[in-house]
Each structure stands twice: as structure tokens, then as C-alpha cells.
């Protein structure tokens, strides 16, 4: 069963560098822990992708269209379709004292910001630091082990997935969604009220909904503050 542009799907994947086998991204918690990628507070679960929207690498987006539901596949992406070839011109030697003066203590392999750009520290020696301004995955062939876990069909399910994409920290079951012909009303759970960036997330949800559901004219968010027993 192939997928088409505009399909809402949930994917699980583990992404690694072909040359070294190093895993650099995954949606699966056990893999993240095993590969020492696990971040506290991160949500590990199948990721929402709208096929053809560029939410993943273009080559991966195209490969997804030929996959089958619940069938694990391996997608190989050459550097030119991933993060490009490495450019030797983007490797610079910088005096160590310049970094120290900016309050940066470099360590080999660390990513630092220098003159407004991200760089990877390659070597340190003789008072000089080699900084690589290429993207960390430039020049690398990537392998994605990917499984399409689910195709979302129901409009309400799709809207809830769009909400969860923007506010992953709060369980989707806690949002109350009322979907009408041209209007969506979303009752926010209290734990979402104070999340950092919540206003931007709400704006993002409204734009997403109106993009994928052009008939929706209005997206209304409600936040209800209830007095707790014992409060003055």
C-alpha cells in the first residue's frame, strides 16, 4: 500500500551514518538509551509526517511514498540528497585565546557558536583550534530504518495529531476538541497554560489546521481557570 502526498502518517525510525554505524536520531526510547542519545523530557513516540510537506529530508519524504504499512524498510540517502558534500573551505584554524576570550572552552567533538555560526571542534593544539563549519552530517551517507506505524484517516484524529506535534509535552487525551463544519474549538488542559512558547504553538496549530483543512475559518482556544478548593 503506497502513500500519497497529503497523507497523514505516523512513523518510527532510527537514523544512522552508513560509514560508522553511529545512530544520530531515533523516535524509539530504548534505542535512544542504548545509543546514549536519550534526553530527559524528550518525547519518544512515532512521529507525525504529512507526506510531501518536507517535514523530513526530501529523499526520505519521497521514499516514504513507496513503503508499506507496518513493514520495516531501510532507506539509504547519499550525501548530495542529505546534508551535502563536505566543503574543505569551511574548516578554519582559530587562535585558542579568541575562543577563551568569548568564554568558550573548546572540547574536541563539541559544537560551539563562533561569529554567529555553529561549528564542530575537530582538533586543539599549539594554541590553535580547528573549527569545522560544515553541518555535522555533511559528506555522510545516511541510513533510515523506518516503519510506517499508522495512516490517519479521521479528520478529528488528524487535527489532534497536529496539536500533539506542536505541544508534545501534554498528553493529547487531555485536550477537548469540538470540530464543526467551519470552526474548531479546542479546550486547553491547565498544564498547557504555562508552557514556554505556548502562544507560538497555538498560532502554529491554527495555521496548520487552516492549511490542511481549508474549510475551517476559525480556530478557537479556550482556557478555563477553576478555583481550587481551599483557595481564598
Image (cartoon, helix red, strand yellow):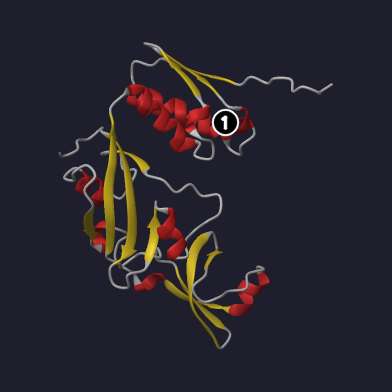
Residue 125, image quadrant:
bottom right
Helix, strand or loop for disc 1: helix
In-image side of 100 versus 149 (left or right): right
Q: Residue at left 25%, top 50%?
A: 60
14 versus 208 height, above or below: below
**Quadrant of the image occupied by residue 21:** bottom left
**Furthest residue toward top:** 181
Q: Residue furthest front?
A: 229
Give the quadrant of the C terminus. Answer: top right
> Residue at left 64%, top 34%?
194
Q: Is 142 situated above or below 190?
A: below
Q: Position of residue 27 (x, y in %)?
A: 39, 51
Residue at position x 39%, y 26% in the image? 159
**Residue 169 drawn at (x, y percent):** 53, 40
Q: Between 148 and 91, which is closer to the camera in this rendering?
A: 148
Q: Where the N terminus falls, by quadrant? A: top left
Question: What is the crowding at mark 1: few (fewer than 14 residues within 10 Å), some, or many (at least 20)?
Answer: few
Q: Is 62 on the left-hand or right-hand side of 191?
A: left
In the picture of the structure, the residue carrying the numbered disc 1 is: 199
Question: Residue 217: x percent and y percent?
Answer: 41, 14
Residue 24 location (% of width, % of height): 39, 62
Q: Is residue 181 left or right of residue 145?
A: right
Residue occupying the point 52% across, 70% down: 110
The foreground one among 109 and 232 is: 232
In-front residue for pair 91/195: 195
* 23 relative to 164, above or below: below
Give the total number of marks visible in the rendering. Answer: 1
In the picture as drawn, the residue positioned furthest to the bottom comes out as 126
Depth check, front residue: 16 or 100? 16
Amino acid at each position: 500500500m503506497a502513500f500519497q502526498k497529503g497523507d497523514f502518517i505516523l512513523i518510527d525510525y532510527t537514523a544512522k551514518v552508513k560509514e560508522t554505524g553511529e545512530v544520530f536520531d531515533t523516535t524509539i526510547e530504548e534505542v535512544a538509551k542504548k545509543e546514549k542519545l536519550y534526553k530527559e523530557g524528550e518525547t519518544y513516540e512515532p512521529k507525525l509526517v504529512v507526506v510531501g510537506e518536507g517535514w523530513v529530508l526530501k529523499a526520505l519524504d519521497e521514499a516514504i511514498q513507496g513503503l508499506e504499512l507496518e513493514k520495516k524498510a531501510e532507506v539509504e540517502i547519499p550525501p548530495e540528497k542529505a546534508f551535502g558534500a563536505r566543503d574543505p573551505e569551511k574548516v578554519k584554524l582559530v587562535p585558542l585565546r579568541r575562543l577563551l576570550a568569548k568564554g568558550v572552552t573548546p572540547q574536541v567533538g563539541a559544537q560551539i557558536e563562533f561569529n554567529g555560526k555553529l561549528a564542530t571542534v575537530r582538533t586543539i593544539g599549539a594554541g590553535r583550534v580547528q573549527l569545522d563549519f560544515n553541518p555535522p552530517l555533511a559528506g555522510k551517507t545516511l541510513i533510515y530504518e523506518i516503519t510506517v506505524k499508522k495512516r490517519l484517516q479521521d479528520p478529528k484524529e488528524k487535527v489532534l495529531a497536529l496539536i500533539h506535534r506542536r505541544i508534545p509535552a501534554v498528553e493529547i487525551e487531555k485536550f477537548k476538541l469540538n470540530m464543526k463544519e467551519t470552526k474548531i474549538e479546542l479546550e486547553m488542559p491547565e498544564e498547557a497554560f504555562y508552557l514556554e512558547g505556548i502562544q507560538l504553538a497555538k498560532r502554529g496549530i491554527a495555521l496548520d489546521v487552516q492549511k490542511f483543512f481549508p474549510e475551517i475559518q476559525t480556530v478557537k482556544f479556550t482556557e478555563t481557570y477553576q478555583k481550587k478548593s481551599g483557595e481564598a
